[in-house]
Each structure stands twice: as C-alpha cells, then as structure tokens.
Image: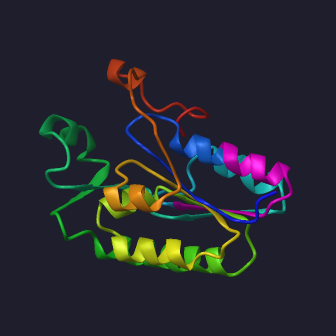
Amino acid sequence: MTTKGYVQVYTGNGKGKTTAAIGLAVRALGAGKRVMFLQFMKAKVYSEHKILPGISPNLTLETVGKPFFVVKEGSMPEEELAKWRDKAVIFPPGQPPREYVELIEKGIERAREALTGGEYDLVVLDEINVALYFGLVSWEQVEALIDSRAEKVELVMTGRGAGPELIEKADLVTEMREIKHYYMQGVEARKGIEN
C-alpha cells in the first residue's frame, strides 16, 4: 500500500464532478480512512447533506457558501445570464462580493488545517475550482494549499474551469465533458439527482 497522497482534479462542463468525489469519499471510508469533505460555493441544500454526516464517524462534511450563485460579468452569454439574474449576484471582473471572499478565506483556512493537521487521509475541496475561476481565491492561495498538505494526504479538487496552472500541478485530472444534457430540454435540477 502506498503512503504517498496525490492531487486529483475533477473538472469540465459535464455532470458528475461532485458525484465522483462523493463516491471516492465513500470508498475511502469503506477502507477505514478519515475524510474531510469541504464544499465551497454551496449551502447545505443538497441531498448529500441529509445522508453523508450519518454514514461514518470518520467523515466530516462542511460547507462554505451562501444560497446564491455568483457570476462574473461577461462570463456567459446574455441569454444565459438572463436566466440567472434573480438567482445570482453578478459582479464586475476582479470585484467579487466581499462577503463571499471572506467566507471563502475561512474555507481556505479550514482546508489548510485539514491538509496539514494529520486528522484526515482524504480531503475533498468540492467546487474550489469554481471559487478560483471567479477570483474568490487566488492561484497563489490554492497552490500554497497544495504545497502545504502532508505527504500522505490525498487531495481531491472539483469544479468547472480548472485553470492550466492547476492542471499542471495535479497528479490526476479528469474532465467531465458534456455531450448531451436534459437541461437543454428545460428539465430543472432534480432532487436526489442534481441536488
């Protein structure tokens, strides 16, 4: 059995990044490993919050987010942006909402503790790639997290928009590519499947 932990990245526009990380966490728990599952950009409104905390005393699930989305101006076509106007905070590039930045900074500190404290074998930073993409956290902060982790800690980072620096730094990168999705037929997120 290897004693070295690796850095895994799950990214891309296709469905399944968080789902893959949850599956990996369950597998690690089954092997007796201790898991920190830290979700950025999310509130406790997803179905996994009802089941994961009770499946093992070796799992810690925490969220760092608010029940609204953030969108950089110019990051999506106007017709798509129109769908999100009532559900999102839209901000100029380089000027993300301060309250969200402060929440993410707390999450980064919590991640650092999990990666260096010796309490966890697997640390999942769910949606950290999105926080990085939106400028809520800097590449320097994320790189410092990666570099600070204890040698035996496996680190999983999920979310759309993983940049070239992160892809280069990671040991494993999987891109979920959307080929077809029922969202395009007007199907909303379904409880237990997408949320």
- Compared with residue 17, is residue 32 higher up or lower down, i.e. above or below? below
Q: Residue at x 78, y 64 (%)?
A: 34
Residue depicted at x 28% and y 70%: 97
Q: Position of residue 111 (x, y in %)?
A: 57, 73
Foreground residue among 179 and 186:
179
The image quadrant that residue 77 belongs to is top left
Pick the quarter of the image with the N terminus.
bottom right
x, y percentage for residue 44? Answer: 57, 56
Q: Report the side of 29 relative to 163 (left or right).
A: right
| Quadrant location of the C terminus in the rendered image | top right
The residue lying at 19 percent from left, 40 percent from top is: 82
Left or right position of 30 against 51: right
Q: Is residue 24 magenta?
A: yes
Figure colour scheme? rainbow
Q: Which residues fall within the magenta stretch?
A: 23-39
Give yes or no for residue 136 being in the magenta stretch. Answer: no
* Residue 94 position by quadrant: bottom left
- Residue 39 x/y as whole percent: 54, 60
- Picture quadrant where residue 113 is located: bottom right
Q: Position of residue 124 (x, y in %)?
A: 60, 59
55, above or below 175, in the image:
below
Number of on-image labels: 0
Look at 49% across and 56% down and name the residue there: 42
